[in-house]
Amino acid sequence: MSRPGARAVLALPIVLLLAAGCGTAGNGTTAGGASVSTTTAADSTALGAMVPPDVAKDGKLTIGTDATYAPNEFLDSGKPAGMDIDLGNAIAQQLGLTADFQTGAFDTLLPGVSAGKYELAMSSISVNTDRLQAVDLVTYFTAGTAMAVLKGNPADLALDGLCGHTVAVEKGTTQDQDLAARSANCTQSGKLPITVSELPAQTDVVQALTSKQADAMLADSPAVAYAIKQAGGQLEQLGGTFATAPYGIAVGKSKGDLAKAVQGAVQALIEDGMYQQILDKWGISAGGIKTSEINPQTYS
């Protein structure tokens, strides 16, 4: 995933729609006031003891996120909300800490973790080889890539027929890499390259498609499904989901047992049912996992 700057007037309806579908603001309470049960920290002592002193000393767990990727992470009345925010709050509670979400562009999150700006990054980060070289990744969800087009597919596109077309994508995402490879294949075959419109926010990617500045968009399957739902019949998914991979919570490689503590917290939430409650709340239970891992084997 990744994201852009100022919104055009044409994008206002979709931006408002994205905001209208909000859930929690990261405190276990929905925008309408209905509460979601939270996990008690009865078994958090052992996990909390694994947290490095430099992380635990202020009582906060600083988490970087790019809050433009609904329903996983987005802004609700200016506050981070979504599946990742609810899970991040629950993980911090398991560790005896309070989550402190800080927003930033997607392609700055992993460098921010490595530099110590963030203690974790939690922002729909798909696990791949390059990212594993930079940080440790604790798995907590699975998602694939999907493509959306305008309703009726007026450009008559297919996933393997994007040469010569403009496709919007968030900068720094796995989809960005996917389109670069597809475009290279186009030119090698003597066809026009794909015009890849790299944008700094997923909201801008949706805007580009709905305002007909792009013929299609690629994003993680939950983000595509949510955008289609919120777009009021303007969009549709073309084809199925592909390139499924786990999401990982990024942890600095110099942070001692912090990755183990986070993995233990995720597993505890899976086992006590809180994890399933959160996925059900956001309508994305299909991506749930049964076992959290640190740095799983990957083939990309």
Image (cartoon, rainbow, N blue to C red):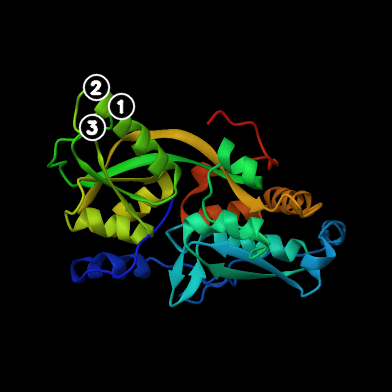
Gap in angstroms between the C-alphas marked 3 and 1:
15 Å
Q: Provide residue 230's location: percent of width, then percent of height.
A: 30, 59
Residue 53 relative to residue 189: left or right: right
Name the mark on residue 272.
none
**Dot 2 or dot 3, earlier in sequence:** 3
Q: Provide residue 229's location: percent of width, then percent of height.
A: 31, 55
Q: What residue sits right under mark 1 in the picture?
A: 185
Whether residue 231 is visible, yes or no, is no
Q: What residue sits right under mark 2 in the picture?
A: 189
Category of crowding for the residue at label 1, using alpha-carbon neighbours closer than 10 angstroms: few (below 14), some (14–19), many (at least 20): some
Please identify, in this view, whether the residue under mark 3 or under mark 1 is nearer the observer. Answer: 1
Residue at 42% x, 54% y: name it: 2
Q: What residue sits right under mark 3 in the picture?
A: 158
- Specify the farthest residue to the top: 189
183 versus 1 height, above or below: above
User: Under tag 2, what secondary structure?
Assistant: loop
